[in-house]
Image: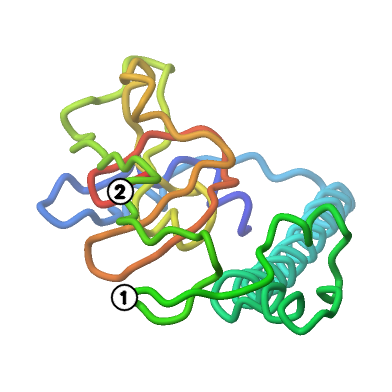
Amino acid sequence: MYYLLKSIGLESMNADSAVPGLNREAAHTRKIRVPPLAEQRAIAHILGSLDDKIELNRRMNETLEAMARALFQSWFVDFDPVRAKAEGRQPAGMDAATAALFPDSFEQSELGEVPRGWRIVPLDRVATFLNGLALQKFPPQGDRYLPVIKIAQLRQGSTEGSDRASADLVPAYVVDDGDLLFSWSGSLEVAIWCGGRGALNHTCSR
């Protein structure tokens, strides 16, 4: 039933009110095909296995993200490799080539002690940022469309249930896997996008 309701286009049954809503009568009269019970169970088994795999991947991603956060904290906030080299020790968990990228002493800056030779610059000097578009002005054309990436999609990591926008946007506003996205409206969400190609909504930036 879960996959059935996700596949019959409930969003197309919007009651056309100011607040999006589902017209119950339209949903109740929708005709569907019901396969034999044995076939239903076989389908449910396959879909359930896929759901289990998706959940396992989600947990693995959470673990990897936690490891990446811990590594960033150690290297670029606590400066553990620099402290180790300053004390004549080999930085833990790091090969010689990577360790060579870090200095072996500190110097004072306006922000306090930093690794020698490192610069303090505004973030917009080392990265570029692009706000998204008000995509209701770019409706899809026929069957060609891009799913819209808003804060909700950023949080869930996918474009499931998203709005649709034109597929002919300026390439700069088309999001691909690996792009760094963040929201600046409501709550701050930051993520490396892995949910497939989409259109960048005005509540997010890349």
On screen, residue 115 above or below 88: above
Dividing the picture into quadrants, the one containing residue 53 is bottom right
Label 2: how many Cα within 10 Å (few below 14, some 14–19, many 20+): few
125 left or right of 68? left
Q: Quadrant of the image for the N terminus?
A: bottom right
Give how far apart the Cα atoms at labels 2 and 1 are: 19 Å
Q: Secondary structure at mark 1?
A: loop
The image quarter in which residue 66 lies: bottom right
Horizontal arrangement in the rendering, residue 100 relative to residue 162 (left or right): right
Left or right: 16 as drawn, with respect to 6: left
Which mark is first along the chain, 1 or 2? 1
> Circle 1 is placed at which residue position?
110
Colouring scheme applied when the structure was drawn = rainbow
Q: Residue at x 72, y 72 (%)?
A: 67
Residue 14 position in % (x across, y down): 27, 46
Which x, y percent locates residue 81? Answer: 72, 73
The C terminus appears in which quarter of the rendering?
top left
Give the amino acid type for the residue marked by disc 2 in the picture.
Answer: Asp
Closer-to-camera residue (18/33): 18
CB of mark 2 within 8 Å of CB of mark 1?
no
Residue 35 in the image: x percent, y percent?
Answer: 76, 43
Residue that mark 2 sits on:
124
